[in-house]
Image: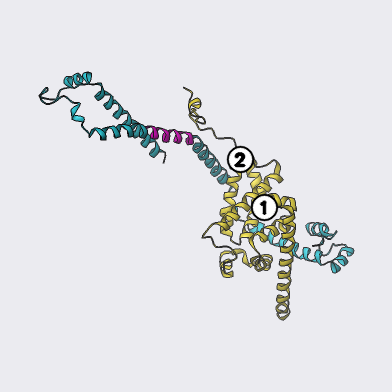
Amino acid sequence: MNWDFVIPGVKTTDTVQVTEPAMNSERFAAFYERSARPLWAYLARVSGDPALADDLMQESYVRFLCASAPGDGEVESRRYLFRIASNLMRDHWRRPGTTSIDDLPEEIFVSVDSTDQMDSWARLKPAMARMRPRDRQLLWLAYAENYSHREIAQITGLAIPSIRLLLFRARRKISRILLQQSELSAPDNRRKR
Amino acid sequence: MKPCPHETEVQAILRNGHWPEACEPEFRSHLETCSTCRERLLVLQAFHAARTEAVQTARVDHPNLLWWRAQLRRRNEAIERVGKPIATAQIFALCIAIFAGAPLLKSQIQKGWNWSSWLPGPSSVSRFDVQSLFASAESDWSLLLLLTGLCTIVLLSALAVYLATDRK
């Protein structure tokens, strides 16, 4: 008896039909090799929490593979992956009971981040900590990943004019903070010499 | 928010590693006068350096692990999709059983649970035997119908409850 006729959607075959993934394992391994590190960098630096970045990165890839049409080509796939990661990060911040990165004291980041000793991040981290999460996202996508406004709009879901304005303000703010930091550290450096 | 025509140039110079030594003198003099490009250069430099360092220290798992996790999730999602109509059918069966049982229960309450009246009295049959039960059932069809209906409801309800709990 054909149960499909009685109850629509019921498969009478022995095995459950799982739709084929868009990428095979070899193709995925190659794509992962190229995209995992930049994605981790994005998640870790924007969230300020490397442990959270590990979790979100895994979830991003699993969701990417479960998606029916993750995008054609490397660039499109990578953008789609960043979009998933951005949404996951936003969900994490929105979740009740989750402490926003802005509310955490600076010491927590120091203890969690083992890569703190590095100069570039040590210089950028205090400035990033003073930015809003969305601004951090936009700044990283625009200036670390070199994404265009159109691409950022696709990743974040914001409108292009909004991105232009938000990015302009965020850049102005972070550059001011960076300049203040370099001015503050300049007398210290002179004293060291 | 006035865009500078050299904005894209800043990005290209930095990406190609021309800053600061291999940079054109014209661009260098432009930077002295243009605060937007100066600002952009400062931010780009900071983010590029932070990205390079972060990419080097990134902790990445083996891709096969994620591949199998995704496969497992896809399979579970497919099973869930298939199970949804079955669950609906189970709920439907349970509703039917309740709707069939409720009027019967109501009628029995109205009759005052007087089931013994259907059975042959103790005067006619001195002891219980199957033949007398069948004989009474033949004479009184309502008893047979009641027993069949009750059995069906009990079986259907048990099946529906079993299937519903088994899925969990």
- SS at mark 1 in the image: helix
Q: Mark on residue A25?
A: 2
Q: Position of residue A140 (x, y in %)?
A: 69, 58
Asked whether A162 or A66 is in front, the reply is: A162
What residue sits right under mark 1 in the picture? Answer: A156
Residue B61 visible in the displayed image: no
Q: Quadrant of the C terminus of chain A?
A: bottom right
* Residue found 28% across the figure and 24% down from its top: B145
Chain the render paints cyan: B
Q: Position of residue B61 (x, y in %)?
A: 58, 50
User: Would you call the spot at circle 1 few (<14 residues within 10 Å), some (14-19), or many (20 or more)?
Assistant: many
Same chain for labels 1 and 2? Say yes or no.
Answer: yes
Instruction: Say what amino acid the circle numbered 2 marks.
Output: Ser
The part of the image, by quadrant, that contains residue B124 is: top left
Q: Is residue A120 above or below residue B148?
A: below
- Furthest-front residue in view? B110
Residue A126 visible in the displayed image: yes
Chain the render paints yellow: A
Q: Is residue B108 above or below residue A30?
A: above
The answer to whether B120 appears left or right of A50 in the picture is left
Residue range highlighted in magenta? B83-96
